[in-house]
Amino acid sequence: MNIIRIIVLSLFVFTQSQADTIYNLIKIPNLEIYNLNTSNKLRYLYAKQPFTIGVDKNINCYNSEKKVLDKKYKIIKENLDRYDQKFLKKINLKYIVLCEDLSISKINTAGIPDNIMKTLILDVKFDESYFERVIHHEVFHIINDSYKEIFDEKIWTNFNVEEFEYAKCSTCTDKLGLDTYSNTNGFFTEYSQSTASEDMAEVFSHLMIGSDLKNIDPILKQKIQFIKINLLKIDQNFILWLKRLKPLNQKR
């Protein structure tokens, strides 16, 4: 019995030490380890209790029920397993934080990327209709924040028709729809029309889930080519493993 107690106590001290170390790295309190043993070396954490972070303490998220967490973890991991370890290291992504009812300045959001802290916070309760696509959307923001000089918004904006203008910020517009257009006309979704960076993220996310690209318009073809060319500057193998990916089944 004493040996068992020692083993259990040692395991607790070990995992608590890991959690403390991770807090020191990413500065998010009240986290527990979900899974550290993954093929691409991503570290999955979850909120044991609600947390508030940010310079202005304006980012909030809450703990989730275990059954919800377990279900969404499988979906999240399946999607993030599409990225290999080398690519994730290049874009500065290492920690995935799972929680629910994520908000910034009281505005609900699917995810909050932070390439400096190598962290992506994901809301496991986000609308299931778009959940998988949103994961890749947020990954692109990590990519974009790490390689701003590559994804030039002026070049991107010039792909659009001359009279079109993006909003000044993604929360400064009512263009929030995430349904994929049947007639694209330069954009995959209504949300694509909010800002250039959101437009890029929507294009990237459709690429990553294997959307049908056969009948898209000439403007969108240019945007897709721009994304692919610039991703190759980050990782020369990107197109090869993109081609190997099978389309995701988003109806679960």
Image (cartoon, rainbow, N blue to C red):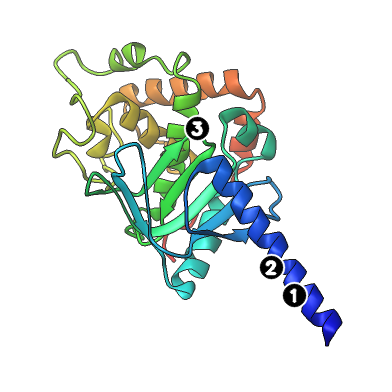
Circle 1: element type: helix
Q: Is residue 41 left or right of residue 92?
A: right
Q: Is residue 17 left or right of residue 64?
A: right
Q: Is 4 placed above or below 51 here?
A: below
Q: Position of residue 178 (x, y in %)?
A: 27, 46
Q: Position of residue 14 (x, y in %)?
A: 72, 60
Q: Is 9 placed above or below 128 here?
A: below
Residue type marked 3: Asn
Total of numbered circles in the picture? 3
Does residue 71 appear anywhere in the picture? yes
The residue pinned by badge 1 equals: 8
CA distance for labels 2 and 3: 30 Å
Label 1 neighbourhood size at 10 Å, few (<14), some (14-19), many (20+)? few
Q: Earlier in the sequence, mark 2 or mark 3?
A: 2
The residue pinned by badge 2 equals: 12
CA distance for labels 1 and 3: 35 Å
Does residue 210 appear anywhere in the picture? no
- Which quadrant is home to the N terminus? bottom right
Q: Is residue 144 left or right of residue 101?
A: right
Give the residue displayed 54% in from the left and 24% down from the top.
231
Circle 3: element type: loop
Who is closer to the viewer here, 116 or 74? 116
Q: Position of residue 48 (x, y in %)?
A: 48, 65
Q: Are marks 1 and 2 in contact (CB under 8 Å)?
A: yes
